[in-house]
Amino acid sequence: MGHEVLETAYAPLLALVEGLDDDAAWRPTGCAGWAVRDLVFHLLGDAQRALVALGTPATGPADVDAVTYWRVWSPEDPGADSSRRHTRIMASVWSGIRPLADLYAETARAVLVHARRFAGDELVATQGHTLTVGDLLATLAVEAGVHHLDLTAHLPGPPPAPEVLRLVRDVLDGLAGRPVAPDWDDVHYVRVGTGRTPLTAAERESLGPVAELFPLFG
């Protein structure tokens, strides 16, 4: 996985964030309990983590890849609520959205510059794991795609690019252990697979035992 998919994921997300004003910043998102400003602060943290990871070479072997990295991220994890509260508190420190949004945009663009300098098979470390740069960039693109949908849940804007949604679908299928509901459109699958939208009774029956794995990550 090269830097191209990350650029495809980041470009429309940056355009959305750069168009925000303080009124839009208080609107809800697809992330339960978070307003737009909270999500932008979280995106800033993602970009900062990416810069640190790209600056942290590691020795092998890799212990996670673009799919298995997500196994530890569940909205039902014990620490999820405290993480959401922490984000709300930190985001509230900013008096307006523009300085926060501008810092995120500046940091995300720096990530893209650094990403182009690496071979995809180089190893880096992040959050206690070792993975290839290609897999790291894929995880960042997946995160950007999911949060792009979160931002546009209550704001106007186009969905993520089809190739980004396909990447998220591939991760969800990988976590499920098989292709899931190929008749679902990508946006619906991403929202259900990440716990943004609950499974209906009919969907749960159709999925069978794999329904017990949902949400596949959050």
Image (cartoon, rainbow, N blue to C red):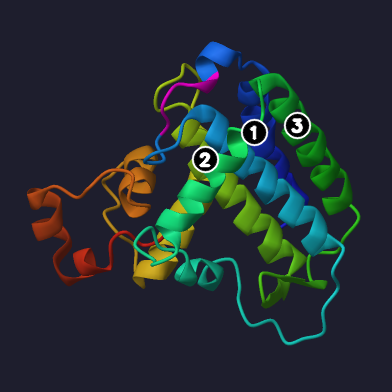
Residue occupying the point 70% across, 20% down: 98
Return the residue at label 2. Answer: 88
Q: Which mark is residue 93?
A: 1
What label sits on residue 105 in the rendered view? 3
For the record, the magenta segment spans: 25-29
Q: Quadrant of residue 80?
A: bottom left
Name the residue type under label 1.
Val
The CA distance from mark 1 to mark 3 is 18 Å
Work out how far the residue at label 2 is from the one at label 1, CA to CA, in angstroms: 9 Å
Q: Residues within 10 Å of mark 2 (few under 14, many from 20)?
A: some
Secondary structure at numbered mark 1: loop
Element at label 2: helix
Q: Which x, y percent locates residue 102?
A: 76, 26
Q: What residue type is disc 3 on? A: Ala
Taking the magenta stretch, the answer to whether it contains residue 87 is no
Horizontal arrangement in the rendering, residue 179 relative to residue 147 (left or right): left
Q: Quadrant of residue 97?
A: top right
Instruction: Check the picture and name the quadrant holding the N terminus.
Output: bottom right
Q: Residue at x 39, y 47 (%)?
A: 190
Residue at the spot 28% in from the left edge and 44% down from the top edge: 184
Occupied quadrant, residue 144: top right
Q: Nearer the viewer, residue 11 or 198?
A: 198
Q: Is residue 11 left or right of residue 91?
A: right
Residue 68: image x %, image y %? 52, 73
